[in-house]
Amino acid sequence: MEYTLTELANRCGGLLRGNGDTLIRSVATIQHAGPGAITFLSNNRYRRYLAETRAAAVILTPADADICPVPALVSDNPYLLYARVATLLTAALAPQKGVDAGAKIHPDARVSAEAWIAPGVVLEKGVVIARGACIGPNCVIQAGASVGEDSRLVANVTLCHDVRVGKRALIHPGAVLGADGFGIARDGDTWVKVPQLGSVVIGDDVEIGANTTIDRGALEDTVIDNGVKLDNQIQVGHNAHIGEHTAIAGCVGISGSAHIGRRCMIGGGAGVAGHIEICDDVTITAMTIVSHSIHEPGVYSGSLPMDTGAQWRKNSARFRQLDEFVRRLITIEKKLKD
Amino acid sequence: MEYTLTELANRCGGLLRGNGDTLIRSVATIQHAGPGAITFLSNNRYRRYLAETRAAAVILTPADADICPVPALVSDNPYLLYARVATLLTAALAPQKGVDAGAKIHPDARVSAEAWIAPGVVLEKGVVIARGACIGPNCVIQAGASVGEDSRLVANVTLCHDVRVGKRALIHPGAVLGADGFGIARDGDTWVKVPQLGSVVIGDDVEIGANTTIDRGALEDTVIDNGVKLDNQIQVGHNAHIGEHTAIAGCVGISGSAHIGRRCMIGGGAGVAGHIEICDDVTITAMTIVSHSIHEPGVYSGSLPMDTGAQWRKNSARFRQLDEFVRRLITIEKKLKD
Amino acid sequence: MEYTLTELANRCGGLLRGNGDTLIRSVATIQHAGPGAITFLSNNRYRRYLAETRAAAVILTPADADICPVPALVSDNPYLLYARVATLLTAALAPQKGVDAGAKIHPDARVSAEAWIAPGVVLEKGVVIARGACIGPNCVIQAGASVGEDSRLVANVTLCHDVRVGKRALIHPGAVLGADGFGIARDGDTWVKVPQLGSVVIGDDVEIGANTTIDRGALEDTVIDNGVKLDNQIQVGHNAHIGEHTAIAGCVGISGSAHIGRRCMIGGGAGVAGHIEICDDVTITAMTIVSHSIHEPGVYSGSLPMDTGAQWRKNSARFRQLDEFVRRLITIEKKLKD
């Protein structure tokens, strides 16, 4: 694909600055862009490369536009404009259609003629695959599960029985949706399994990262709402609910029955306790433990910054006696009062 | 399946209260149960729904029985009784038997005629599958590995060579048992691989969550004892030993040669250091780092509760100088003594 | 295989002590070794077993050699010498060659006649498999990806399109290389996907653990340099760079665009923030959060040691007011100065 800068501005937005006839064929980083490539500047760390860039054009903010040596598309949200331009320039070919001879389709599965089923895929009884869906190699979709229009399971994805995936989902390799929740009841010294009878329901426009796991509900469903974006290796426990347009970074663990609001952002490695509620528009920083409900939008944190090993050892040893030190402080305060 | 409340009491336990002829066909939550459904009450958060429940019957404690508006099964451990009732009511059909034409079975593998091998399964040389076992779609079982009676590998599970799984195991999708332990020896600037010659031995009645990984031992075996329950995305290092009926929540990491006792409970995201020992009946709270051996049963913790970002920044900045503050405190104490 | 102790010393190194004609057929732990087995002693925890060992020979340090009751190979790095001896004694048979009838190979894939493609493997268009490579059961290699000489993908590994794996790689089951990086741009209340146009490049002699995920770059490649060793369930974000011979333990999360130097060691469960730099020869202890760049080699820490639940609750409650306590300390200091 090839567009003039004027065409890109018309289709994707942004204010043109400089020669609108500049031809754009590709995207690249600001450091390494060459002729025909457009780049973007949205992180201050990279501004030092602007003066020397060999890009054909740059997407940037009004503030940076004045010092841009080449034509530009100007926007208050250059990263978003870049996303649109890159999507346009790298538009994929129409996906394949049909069922590969190496797939195993149960006779009672219903597959749209407009879907693609790759080699090695197993579709069990009652599975429904909508038109435009693409089920990549070696995916397993168990009895009664369904995949909505234009959704893509890249490869080696497992949907357990009765899981429902909405439209335009993108599910990366190794993801497992609908494994049993971790429900066990103590019986003296041993454990008795609690049947996990709910399912998993995924809304529209959801992205699910590689090796992420989302457990089925115990009695009702685990729910991932429209527009949720999940990174890799996230664990979502049974009956959790994740609200619309919430984005969660890699390695986060969400315990059972946690209820997370809309438009939240959760940093990598964080943990959310079970049966708690997080309201809309909450940001959790990386590796924080959300141990209780949050009722006010805002930023919440809980992880200590690293230090040199020697300094850390001193401070953490003191931490082990923190309560005692505070008591001694209070004793001094009393003494001084007298 | 359909039972009277009296039949459920006879088969599963619990003291009948109210009309024993009440017919029960399903299980449901206390909020959403309707006619024919039994529910349970074991968590105080849900007691407020009891008065209004439309369930046909409720499983609950003696203390809650008096305020129950419908027939009840009374037990000191309602969650356990519910587990039994739900298991009875939702009993699965007898599993399939036979070998799907789309499975690839090495001629030297031995598969019971009473087992089920799904499409896409690969069984290598010397594999043994016992009767009642169910090997789900696209599982890979490598040379010499074995699966005991009535065990189920749901889908996309990998057993590496010579891994042994006991009876009645339930292994969820994406689990990997028997990958090489992380054994490397430093050789100047580079690393030399240490052969991983042990295996993994899984006892009876073990459940293993989705995408959990259990490495093979370096020289001897990694051992998961009878009745152990592992949630999703747990990592178990080589030569670890997990004692009977220990339950471990999601995202826990257990380092090599750690020895964990019986009936322990480990919360989500916790980490256990290598070569340490945890005695029986220890509870570790979520995201705690078990950095040294534990010789006394009890509860152990190590994670800080989250705070607002602003408050957290202040406190964590002080933490970086905690040792200095304590020294200053001691100086004051000395001064006041003089 | 069977060797005399003299032959082992000649081939693997180490100073012979005692009878060089001692025959060695196997390796074992110091506690459980029997006739014909060689063992090693490199961890002080196990020295107490030395006097009673029934091993045919022991690999150990000069300091331990004097108290060794059996023949020995003496080395300053007994674990490394053991790794070499064990590799020699347990040398695998020559791997299989050819393409199993149950693999699905795109006609435009190029597979060396000296490679092995197991049942259930899917190779898409343009894939290149070099000689000596071994692609285990049910692996998926997507369009344009390549695997170098003598590399082994054990089973159920996914390489997404255009990923390049070097020579002698060992990739364990469930690993996913080249899934899309987590790139999303905010658009009001929703998110727009940013195309992930780079790839993943893996050097030579790299080991990648089970269920580890390495995302493809956004514009340029995610790079894992020669000799890097990654344990299980590690997450590597887009455009990260891991330098030569760095070793990373299980469950570590590395955010996008992090640049990690050579010969680093990162402990289990640690997290590395995005866009930061870690210089060569840095050691990060387990479960530390690397929140900012590190420019000096050395050891860095950031995790608190566990305590009993009761003691922990007291200390962590005080932590929530740490800033206030320090202010009160400063107030006292001022008062005493006056």
Image: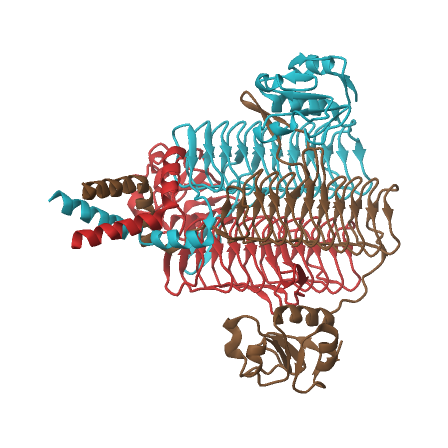
Chain colours: A red, B brown, C cyan
Q: C179 and B55: which one is in front?
A: B55
Q: Which quarter shows the C terminus of chain C?
A: top left
**Where is residue C261 shown, x and y percent of the image?**
47, 29
Residue B99 percent across, percent down from the top left: 85, 53
For the residue pair B290 and A30, the one nearer the viewer reads as B290
Q: Quadrant of residue B31?
A: bottom right
Number of marks? 0
Residue B108 x, y percent position in the rendering:
87, 41
Q: Nearer the viewer, residue A234 or B332?
A: B332
Q: Residue furthest left?
A: C338
Measuring from the top left, give residue B127's x and y in whole percent.
82, 43
Q: Is residue A289 left or right of residue B105?
A: left
**Does residue A10 appear anywhere in the picture?**
no
Side of B259 relative to A335 (left or right):
right
- Residue B322 visible within the image: yes
Q: Where does the N terminus of chain C fall, quadrant-wise?
A: top right
A205, B65: nearer the viewer: B65
Is C302 placed left or right of C159 in the picture?
A: left
Q: Quadrant of residue A290?
A: bottom left
What residue is at 35 percent from the left and 48 percent from the top?
Answer: A322
Up the image or down, A199 lies above or below C332; here it is below
Q: Please, is residue C199 above or below residue A167 in the view?
A: above
